[in-house]
Amino acid sequence: MPPEEVEQVSRFKSLTPEQRQLLLRATKAPGKYTEGVVLSPRVEALFRVVSPALWLALGMTEKHEKAERMRIMREFGCSELEAAMKVAKAHAITSDVTT
């Protein structure tokens, strides 16, 4: 999480130095995973969400991502869902979420 966002959180919740470090460690790798932090009275934890490749492909709304799906639709004469499935398959083969 960017330091500016940690500062915004600290305006609403007092944070210990350890909690600040936990928030700063949360990262995001677009198309791979997103990390989040739980700060509750019982639990303080960093977690990672790895969405299935098809969900990621269906959620791609950037201009270049839509253009790629359209290119696949034209090339293979398929529906948008089928194009997203092809994107998901290619993404699953090339992505590495261990980093």
Image (cartoon, rainbow, N blue to C red):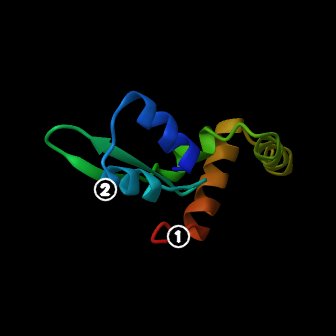
Instruction: Say whether residue 17 is left or right of residue 59.
Output: left
For the residue labelled by badge 2, is the local secondary structure a helix, a strand or a loop? helix
Label 2 crowd (10 A; few <14 / some 14-19 / many >=20) = few
Which residue: 74% across, 42% down? 78
Question: Which residue lies under the disc numbered 1?
Answer: 96
**Relative height, residue 44 to residue 91 (above, below):** above
Number of disc labels: 2
Could you tell me the amino acid type at mark 2? Glu
Q: Nearer the viewer, residue 16 or 27?
A: 16
Q: Classify residue 84 by image quadrant.
A: top right
Instruction: Say whether residue 53 is left or right of residue 41.
Output: right
What is the distance, in whole Å, between disc 2 and disc 1 at their CAs? Answer: 29 Å
Q: Which mark is residue 32?
A: none
Q: Nearer the viewer, residue 14 or 21?
A: 14
Question: Which residue lies under the disc numbered 2?
Answer: 18
Which of pointers 2 and 1 lies earlier in the amino acid sequence?
Answer: 2
What percent of the width, then of the height, locates residue 5? Answer: 53, 41
Q: Nearer the viewer, residue 57 or 42?
A: 42
What percent of the width, then of the height, locates residue 63? Answer: 82, 40
Q: Classify residue 18 by image quadrant.
A: bottom left
Label 1 crowd (10 A; few <14 / some 14-19 / many >=20) = few
Instruction: Say whether residue 67 is left or right of residue 61.
Output: right
For the residue labelled by badge 1, is the local secondary structure a helix, a strand or a loop? loop
Could you tell me the amino acid type at mark 1? Asp
Mark 2 vs 1: CB contact within 8 A:
no
**Relative height, residue 12 to residue 20 (above, below):** above
Q: Nearer the viewer, residue 7 or 84?
A: 7
Judge depth for marks 2 and 1 and give the one in front. 2
Instruction: Say whether residue 79 is left or right of residue 52.
Output: right
What percent of the width, then of the height, locates residue 51? Answer: 46, 49
